[in-house]
Image (spheres, rainbow, N blue to C red):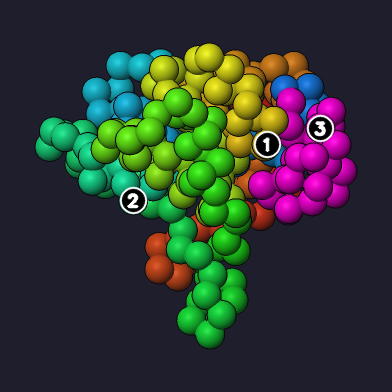
């Protein structure tokens, strides 16, 4: 059985989308889901300080136009080196806080917590490693935080740790979507996704944003 990372519903192993919320477990599932890709978490290697990557440039352009939101996990600043890259990273929205009853404000920027699954992620990313390196621990933390705050897509150039040897497919089967920048841009430009109902960002207290669902845009 597949437990959906968005809603927790149990699904058949062959499911293309969640039977309850329609979150996709396969590329084909993106044709059937009611979800739209809106919130991206970027890996450390995708801090686009020099703006020389055309795919990252395109994602940043769409974000500036309000069609996507690019976010970072707190661990990103901890492992990033170089003043120019750190300054660029500080311009990226941090993950929202997790909603805490009695502390968080209704309508504020905090989000309901998703599953906290570091052991599951370790089993997929580094199944044969007994003692993780600091970099490997950080890789897991990036993805753990992304899942817990309900991000839609994790964007990385680290194919060894997140993509190759079936890792990308295994993550997708539990609803965790990891793409290289060029893969994500290609997906958003597919014919069945050209007209997308994107969420416009609206200003919230504490500098966070949340999404409305009535604005439309076309990726170009």
Q: Find the distance from the CA under tag 2 to the CA under tag 1.
A: 24 Å
Q: Residues within 10 Å of mark 2 (few under 14, many from 20)?
A: few
Tell me: 142 left or right of 179. Answer: left
> Mostly what secondary structure, the magenta segment?
loop
Residue under pointer 2:
74
Query: Residue 47 placed where, x, y %?
Result: 31, 31
Instruction: Point out which mark residue 174 bears.
Output: 1
Judging from the image, what secondary structure is the residue with disc 1 in?
Answer: loop
Query: Could you tell me which residue is drawn at 46 percent across and 49 percent down?
Result: 145
Judging from the image, what secondary structure is the residue with disc 2 in?
Answer: helix
Q: Earlier in the sequence, mark 2 or mark 1?
A: 2
Query: Residue 26 placed where, x, y %?
Result: 74, 26
Judging from the image, what secondary structure is the residue with disc 3 in?
Answer: loop
Viewer-side residue, 150 vs 141? 141
Residue under pointer 3:
13
Q: Find the distance from the CA under tag 3 to the CA under tag 2.
A: 33 Å
Instruction: For residue 70, say whether it is visible.
Output: no
Q: Earlier in the sequence, mark 3 or mark 1?
A: 3
Please identify the quarter of the rendering in which residue 86 is found.
Answer: top left
């Amino acid at each position: 059985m597949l437990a959906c990372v968005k809603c927790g519903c149990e699904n058949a192993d062959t499911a293309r989308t969640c039977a309850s919320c329609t979150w996709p477990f396969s590329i084909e599932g993106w044709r059937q889901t009611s979800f739209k890709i809106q919130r991206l978490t970027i890996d450390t290697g995708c801090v686009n300080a020099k703006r020389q990557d055309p795919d990252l440039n395109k994602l940043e352009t769409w974000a500036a136009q309000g069609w996507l939101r690019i976010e970072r996990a707190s661990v990103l600043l901890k492992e990033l080196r170089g003043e120019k890259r750190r300054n660029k990273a500080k311009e990226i929205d941090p993950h929202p806080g997790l909603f805490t009853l009695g502390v968080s404000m209704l309508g504020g920027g905090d989000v309901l917590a998703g599953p906290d699954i570091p052991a599951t992620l370790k089993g997929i990313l580094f199944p044969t490693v007994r003692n993780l390196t600091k970099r490997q621990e950080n890789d897991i933390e990036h993805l753990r935080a992304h899942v817990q705050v309900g991000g839609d897509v994790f964007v990385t150039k680290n194919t060894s740790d997140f993509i190759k040897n079936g890792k990308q497919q295994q993550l997708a089967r539990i609803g965790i979507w990891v793409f290289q920048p060029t893969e994500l841009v290609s997906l958003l430009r597919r014919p069945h996704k050209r007209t997308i109902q994107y969420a416009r960002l609206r200003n919230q207290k504490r500098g966070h944003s949340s999404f409305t669902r009535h604005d439309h845009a076309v990726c170009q």
